[in-house]
Image (cartoon, grey):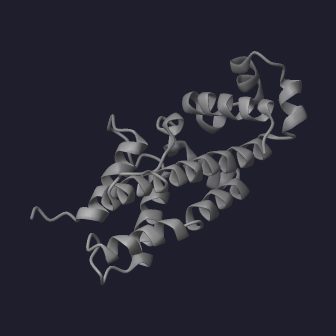
Amino acid sequence: MLSEIKIKILKGTIEVFNKKGLKLTMDDVADRLKISKKTIYKEYSSKEEMFESLADYVFDNIKKREEEILGMEGVATEEKIRRLLSAMPEGYRNINFQELHSLKDKYPKVYKKIQRRLETGWEPTFKLLEQGKAEGIIRPETDLMMVKIMMEASLERFFEKDVMGGSDKKYNDYLNEVTDIILMGISAR
């Protein structure tokens, strides 16, 4: 469990990251939060450690959002699947995920952590997709591992520079579109 100060630092880091990307400094975060840089260094010994903690914090909150979706009463399975595949807590909808491409070179350990988190924790999604198969919402022959691979590949591709360039759409808009394509295909039937 993260302390209040660590959560405050991570939330401030997200805000600064959205403006400056990986070029953010501890000074930038300290200025944004109106705290001393020394306070940040008491919690995080380096920017890399802070980014690692931030990756876990964001993914942990996505998992919490997924649990909320799975526990929703009165929501049809198809809608739960749609929401689960595009799960993103409200506070993260505006994160500039394109800036993450730089992690691969500058902070490979953090990038690998993000990849690991993208590739794991799919069991609840598979269970819901199986339920969708049982209810006739998902074609019975659908290879669920292929759904996972397509989602992962799309998400990783979104992290690359200029993939979403030239558009006023946000990451979440693209995530919703990928989810729609996976669930409905591109056929106009």
Which image quadrant is residue 104 in?
bottom right
Location of residue 49 in the rendering, given as x and y in whole percent from the top left corner: 79, 46
Which residue lies most toward the left here? Answer: 189
- Image quarter (top left, top right, bottom left or bottom right) of the C terminus: bottom left
- Image quarter (top left, top right, bottom left or bottom right) of the N terminus: top right
Tell me: 121 left or right of 96: right
Above/below status of 7 relative to 62:
above
Residue situated in front as seen by the camera: 176 or 101 = 176
- Residue at image coords 49%, 36%: 90
Number of residue marks = 0
Which image quadrant is residue 51 in?
top right
Tell me: 156 left or right of 54: left
Which image quadrant is residue 109 in?
bottom right
- Residue at image coords 42%, 44%: 171
Residue situated in front as seen by the camera: 119 or 103 = 119
Location of residue 61 in the rendering, given as x and y in whole percent from the top left corner: 60, 46
- Residue at image coords 78%, 41%: 2
Residue situated in front as seen by the camera: 94 or 82 = 82
Tell me: 166 left or right of 33: left
